[in-house]
């Protein structure tokens, strides 16, 4: 199982009304946990990505209203990381 902790990013999720700094834990390409900065409970052994200054934006599937992709990008758009939510 691969795990990645994205730490300290600015999460914007309009469907959930979220516009805050958050940490996100991914396991095998799926969101396993979202918590306030420094509060992930399952991050032991995960690689980490310092997302300070980066924006995390969710996208909603119009067919079911479920979040199915999140993009992590820097202000210059130098990279985008896509991952799925359960």
Image (cartoon, grey):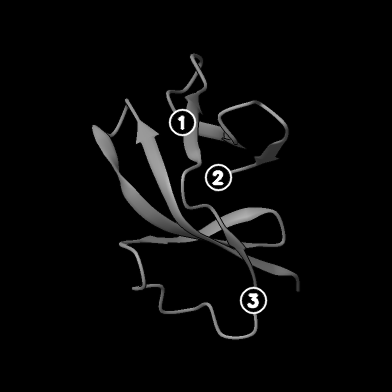
Of the two numbered discs 1 and 2 on the same chain, state the one appearing first in sequence. Answer: 1
Mark seen at residue 46: 3
Nearest to N terminus: mark 2 or mark 3: 3
Q: Secondary structure at mark 2?
A: loop
Q: Report the Cα–Cα distance between label 2 and label 3.
A: 18 Å
Q: Percent from the top left, x then y, of residue 8? A: 42, 57
Nearer-N-terminus badge (1/3): 3
Report the label total: 3
Q: Measuring 33% from the left and 50% from the top, which residue is drawn there?
A: 21
Q: Which residue is mark 1?
A: 66
* Quarter of the view holding residue 16: top left
- Residue 55 placement, left or right of 17: right
Q: State the residue position of label 2.
A: 85
Q: Relative to residue 60, is residue 72 depicted above or below?
A: below
Identified at 39% across, 41% down, the residue is: 11
What's the distance in space between the residues labelled 1 and 3, CA to CA? 26 Å
* 38 displayed left or right of 82: left
SS for callout 1: loop
Q: Is mark 1 in CB contact (under 8 Å) with mark 2?
A: yes
Local packing at callout 1 (Cα closer than 10 Å; few below 14, some 14-19, many 20+) is some
Residue 54 place in picture, x, y as percent:
50, 41
Mark pair 1, 2: CA separation: 8 Å
As drawn, 68 above or below 10: above
Near mark 2 (Cα within 10 A), the count class, few <14, some 14-19 or many ≥20, is some
Mark 3 lies on a secondary structure that is loop
- The foreground one among 15 and 9 is 9
Q: Position of residue 9 (x, y in %)?
A: 45, 49
The residue furthest top is 62
């Amino acid at each position: 199982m691969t795990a990645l902790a994205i730490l300290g990013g600015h999460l914007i999720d309009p469907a959930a009304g979220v516009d805050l700094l958050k940490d996100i834990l991914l396991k095998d390409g799926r969101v396993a946990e979202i918590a306030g900065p420094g509060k992930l409970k399952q991050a032991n052994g995960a690689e980490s990505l310092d997302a300070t200054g980066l924006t995390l934006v969710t996208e909603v599937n119009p067919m079911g209203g479920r979040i199915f992709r999140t993009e992590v990008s820097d202000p210059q758009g130098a990279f985008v990381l896509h991952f799925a939510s359960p």
